[in-house]
Amino acid sequence: MEGIQALHNDQSIIERMQQGDERALELLFKTYYAQLCRFARNMLKDSTQAEDMVQDVFMKVWDKRGQINITTSLKAYLFMAVRNHCLNALKVNERKFWMDESMEDDTRLSDDDMINELSAKSLSERINVAIDKLPAKCRQTFQLSRFEELSYKEIAETMNVSVKTVENQMGKALSFLRTTLDPYIKESMIGMFIIGLFAS
Amino acid sequence: MNEQEITQLITRVLTDEASADEKQRLEKWRNMHTDNEMQFQQTRMIWDNAALFEEDVDTDAAWEKFSARLKTSQKTVNLRTYFRIAAATILIGGAGLLLANLLMGPSMRTVQTASNEIKEINLPDGSIAWLNHDSKLEYEEDFSGKVRAIKLNGEAFFEVTKNPEKPFVITSAHSVTTVLGTSFNLTAYDSTEDVMLNVATGRVSFISTKTKEEVIVTANENASITPNGNTIKHDTYDINGLSWKTKKLVFNNASMAEIFKVLEHYFNVKITVTNPLINNCHTSATYENPKLKNVLDDMSKAANFSYTQKGKEIIVSGEGCK
C-alpha cells in the first residue's frame, strides 16, 4: 500500500517537473539530498566531492526530466544515478572497486585491533565499528536498508543486482554483526534483564 | 531451516519485507527453543541500536547553491538559442555580422561597496565572494566563456565552487589569480600597493602580470606581488587576514606596530604614532566583534599610551617600550 502511494507521488513529481515546475525539483532535492550525500560519501570518502556528485545528479535529472523512466521508485532511481556517477568518478570499473576490499581481510574476528576498538564503547558505537568492517558491497546493502530505508527491490535496482543477492548480503551482514558483537550484546541483554527484574 | 535461511528470515521480518506467512514461521521457530529466541533478540538488538554517526548535511544551503547553478544552466541554454539566431542572420546578409557582435559580447555585472559596508555576492556558478569595503568586483553575467572571469579592485574573500574544466580567474592591479575550487582572500586595492593573497583551503596559482612569474600558494599560506612584479611567498598564514569577514581579531604577543596595522585595515582608519618607541610594546588579546574604542582603550593600558581620535585619524603618544 505504502509502495503504491509512493509511486503515485513519484509520478506526480515527475509530471510537475516535466511541466517545468522547479518546486517539484526542490521537493525532491530537499527530501533526498542528505541521504544521497551520505551514500556518496561512503563510496568516495570525501564529503565535498560527495555533495558535488549528488548536485550533478539532480542537475542531470532536471535536464533530462523528459526521459525519466521509473521502474521501482524515484528514490531508487536517484540512488542508482548517484552510485553510477560515483563509480564513474572513481574511474575504476565496478569489479575492481569492490575487489579492493576482500572478505578475508575484513572479517577476521580475532584481530586485536578490533577488540581494542570494540572495548569501552556504547553498543551503538560498537555496532558502527563492526559495520565498517563489513565488505564494501555488504556494508552498502546494509546501510541502504537500515539507514536510508530502501526496500530490497529498491536496493537491487540501486546496486544493479538481483533481489536474491540483496537478501543474501543482508543475511550475511546481520549474521556477521551478531557473531562479532556477541559478547557485548549478551552483556547488554543481561543488563536489560536486571533492570527488568527491578522494574517489575 | 538452516542457519542461513533463519538469518535471512529474521532479517526479512526486521526490514518489513516478510509476508504474514513468513512472520508466522518465525514466530513458531522462536517458540521452539530459548536459544532461538535469544538469537532473534540479539539480531533485533543490533538492528535497533545501529545508528548513524555522521556529520549533518545542510540541505537548505545546498539547495541555495544548487538553484543558483540551475539558473546559470538555463541562461546558457538561452544563449545558445541566441547564437543560432545570430548565425542565421550572418547567412542572410552583412548587417547580421554587426548584430552577432552585439549579441556575443559578454554582459558584465559590477558590484561596488561603500567605505562602511561588506557585501556577499552569489556568483552564477554557485561560488561566493564577500566584498570588503571600498571594493569593486566585475564578473561576466553567466560565466559562459572558457574561464570564469572576475575583475577585482579592492579586497574580497572567495569560496570557489569546484570545476576543473572552467578555471576561476581573477585579474587585478598587477596580478592574475587562478583557481579550480578553493577558498582564499585577495587584497588588491591600488596599483601602487602590494597585492596580497591569503589561502584558506586548496591550491591557488598567483601570477605577476609584469614578470609573468608564478607562485603556487596552498592552504594556510600567503603571498604578495609588489607593483614592480616581485612575487614573495610567506609560509605563515596571516591570522588576522580574514578578520574583516570573521569579525575576530587575534593578537599573540604582537607588537603595537603589527597591531596598529591590523586595526587600520579592520576599522578602515589611519593611526599615527608620535613616538616610534610605542611600536616596540607587545601584548596579547582576542576580540570577537571588536569595537575600535574598546580595543584602543585596552591597548593604551597595555602599552601605556594616550590617544586622540578625529574622524578616521587617530594620534597615539606616550613613552613607549625599549
Image (cartoon, rainbow, N blue to C red):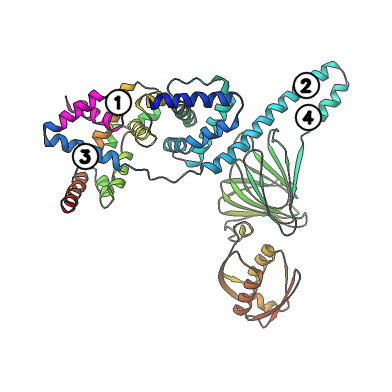
Q: Which residue is mark 1?
A: A167
Q: Which residue is mark 2?
A: B85
Residue sitting nearer the eye, B147 or A18: A18
- Residue A87 in the image: state x and y as whole percent: 46, 29
- Residue B275 in the image: state x and y as whole percent: 71, 79
Q: CA distance from mark 4 to mark 2?
A: 11 Å
Magenta segment? B1-30
Residue sitting nearer the eye, A10 or B242: A10
Q: CA distance from mark 3 to mark 4?
A: 69 Å
Q: Which residue is mark 4?
A: B104
Q: CA distance from mark 4 to mark 1?
A: 57 Å
Q: Main secondary structure of the magenta part?
A: helix
Q: CA distance from mark 1 to mark 2?
A: 56 Å
Of tags 3 and 4, the one toward the viewer is 3
Q: Which residue is mark 3?
A: B42
Q: Is residue B269 left or right of residue A58?
A: right
Q: In this rendering, do the residues under marks 4 and 2 share a single chain?
A: yes
Q: In this rendering, do the residues under marks 1 and 2 share a single chain?
A: no
Q: Amino acid at mark 3?
A: Gln
Q: Amino acid at mark 1?
A: Glu
- Residue B65 in the image: state x and y as whole percent: 59, 40
Residue B310 against residue A192 in the figure, above or below: below
Instruction: Reply yes or no: does residue B27 show up in magenta.
Output: yes
* Residues at discs 1 and 3 in contact (Cβ within 8 Å): no
Badge 3 local density, few (<14 within 10 Å), some, or many (20+)? many
Q: Residue furthest top?
A: B92
Of tags 2 and 3, the one toward the viewer is 3
